[in-house]
Amino acid sequence: MAIAVTSDASAFKRTANLPAASTAYSIWGWFRLTTDRNTFTGLVGLANAVDGASFHQLGTDSDGTTLKIWSQTTSTNVAALSTNTWYFGAMTCSGTGAGTLIGYVRALTANALTSASIAGTSFTPGAAEWGRDCVTGEFISGEIHACGMSNAVLSADELLELSYFHEPQLDGIRSLNVFYPTIESVNTNATVDRSGNARNATATVGALVDAPALLWRSPSPNLVISGTTDITGTLDATLGVLTSAGAGSVDVSGSLSKTLGALTSVGAGSVDVSGQGAVTLGALVLSAAGSVSVEGSLAKTLGALTLVAAGDNGDVAPPDAANDSVILTRRRRPR
């Protein structure tokens, strides 16, 4: 669900923990104008204060439908908006002092971002707002969804990927400051920050409405290797398909969970599944005389283990400690 914002609503905003300066940030969200209010309205913006005099904004001109990128009184057109159409709108600022300000927009039915840029003035942000003009205080008459901000300049490619999904991707958003998915069964929950930073928005939100038809999450990436690949670290690693094309080895280790949809060793490589946390493999296929070592101090789960060639040479090492837990389904092709 998205939330409805009307012309008499309270601001969907943050006034604390904002980017340190207006020279390195990105701000974005989805918007639908249900009514052309024929006045200046804001989609996303940062200002030195609520209704401040210094600001950057992606918002409409006085006609209510010409989308512009603004730096104080300087502006340039980005695109023409239509009512009752969902748009992804984003703004980035980069540089030292006065940086380049770029506005982006994509209609739900489009496959690319439209953009325009101007030179941005430098100021210290005191308010970030979604769905409200930073200067005039005019709200859009419409709906907002999946709003966020980061303390980094996201590229056009990063923003385009972000625009296809309701939620941030599994590999994260660089320097995420806040994220409000606004996918809730109770409208008051729409202001809860889901970035992990506990920076809830200040807002009096309207009724829940249907969200745009976006995907929930991107699929896990496929990875093909021909050498040695280590999947290590202290956080989660998720891969949809891992293929070892040559005689390389794959080491899946670390201190927290690693999830692989399928692991295929095409050559004579070895696979070492170890570490201090859970490792899950949907299917493990060894096409040559490779070996598999499943070790560690927590559970390792393999959905299916197949030794396609020289299977007798494949080895599944038993747990090396009493507290190891290994759950395997091992099968061989008939000869």
Image: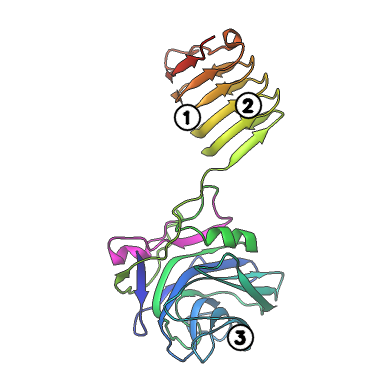
Q: Is residue 174 magenta?
A: yes
Question: Which amino acid is tagged 1?
Answer: Thr
SS for dot 1:
strand
Q: Quick check: 24 above or below 77? A: above
Residues packed near mark 2 inside 10 Å, few (<14), some (14 to 19) or many (20 plus): many
Label 3 and label 2: CA atoms lie apart by 54 Å
Earlier-in-chain disc, 3 versus 2: 3
Report whether residue 235 is seen. Answer: no
Across and down, in percent, residue 197 comes to: 46, 56
Across and down, in percent, residue 280 comes to: 47, 29
Q: Quick check: 318 above or below 144? A: above
Across and down, in percent, residue 268 comes to: 67, 18
User: Which residue corresponds to the image point at 72% horizontal and 28% vertical from the top-left?
Assistant: 227
User: Which residue corresponds to the image point at 68% horizontal and 29% vertical from the top-left?
Assistant: 245
SS for dot 3:
loop
Task: Tell which tag, 3 or 2, sits nearer the viewer.
Answer: 2
Earlier-in-chain disc, 3 versus 1: 3
Boundaries of the magenta span: 172-194
Q: Which residue is under mark 1? A: 280
User: Which residue corresponds to the image point at 44% horizontal and 18% vertical from the top-left?
Assistant: 329
Q: Quick check: 177 above or below 315? A: below
The front one of 333 and 277 is 333
The front one of 334 and 157 is 334
> Left or right: 307 with respect to 141?
right
Earlier-in-chain disc, 1 versus 2: 2
Q: Which mark is residue 250?
A: 2
User: Which residue corresponds to the image point at 44% horizontal and 25% vertical from the top-left?
Assistant: 303
